[in-house]
Image (cartoon, grey):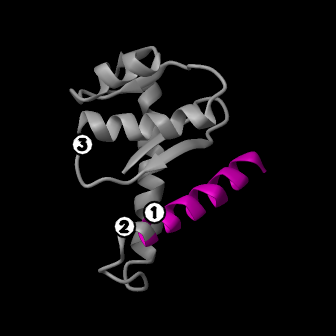
Amino acid sequence: LWAAIDLDSRQVLAVHLTTTRSYFDTMVFLSKLVRSCSNRPIVYVDGGSWYPWALKRYGFPYEWRTFGPRSAIERWFGLLKRRTRRFHNVVPYRSSERSVMEWMEAWVRLYNWRALS
């Protein structure tokens, strides 16, 4: 799961589901992120080798971080994991990628609505 969060508003800007981590996956995710950003904010990334080329291509400034500003997205992933554990017995194990992505997008809309409240 790929996700980007706005550090000021705490809103999730984009999510993307893949089974791999590659330059292509990064490009697809960043194309979603570009649609939700009016500018090119700084992107904080972990040590993934697939980030620099794609971020440069899209014109995003970036910094490698393992703590600090990256904590916001790590907290969000922690919340997501806690929430999805509650659905473990309800959500079918063999859900399609599309249904998982639809669920994620719905959850993100609810999360963002609560973040603005």
Q: Are marks 2 and 3 in contact (CB under 8 Å)?
A: no
User: In the rendered view, would you say 17 is above or below 55?
Assistant: below
Question: What's the CA distance linking mark 1 and mark 3?
Answer: 17 Å
Q: Is 37 displayed left or right of 29 in the figure?
A: right
Rendered residue at 63%/20% (across/down): 39
x and y percent of residue 26 in the render? 34, 36
x and y percent of residue 50 in the render? 25, 29
Q: Are marks 1 and 2 in contact (CB under 8 Å)?
A: yes
Q: Secondary structure at mark 2?
A: helix
x and y percent of residue 103 in the render? 51, 68
Amino acid residing under circle 1: Met
Amino acid residing under circle 3: Arg
- Residue that carries the numbered disc 2 in the rendered image: 97
Q: Is 12 displayed left or right of 30 in the figure?
A: right
Question: What's the CA distance linking mark 2 and mark 3?
Answer: 16 Å
Which residue is at the front of the view, 50 or 67?
50
- Residue that carries the numbered disc 3 in the rendered image: 21
x and y percent of residue 97 in the render? 36, 67
Task: Give the magenta range.
Answer: 99-117
Q: Secondary structure at mark 1?
A: helix
- Residue that carries the numbered disc 1 in the rendered image: 101
Pointer 1: residues within 10 angstroms few (<14), some, or many (20+)?
Answer: some
How many numbered markers are drawn? 3
Q: Secondary structure at mark 3?
A: loop
Pointer 2: residues within 10 angstroms few (<14), some, or many (20+)?
Answer: few
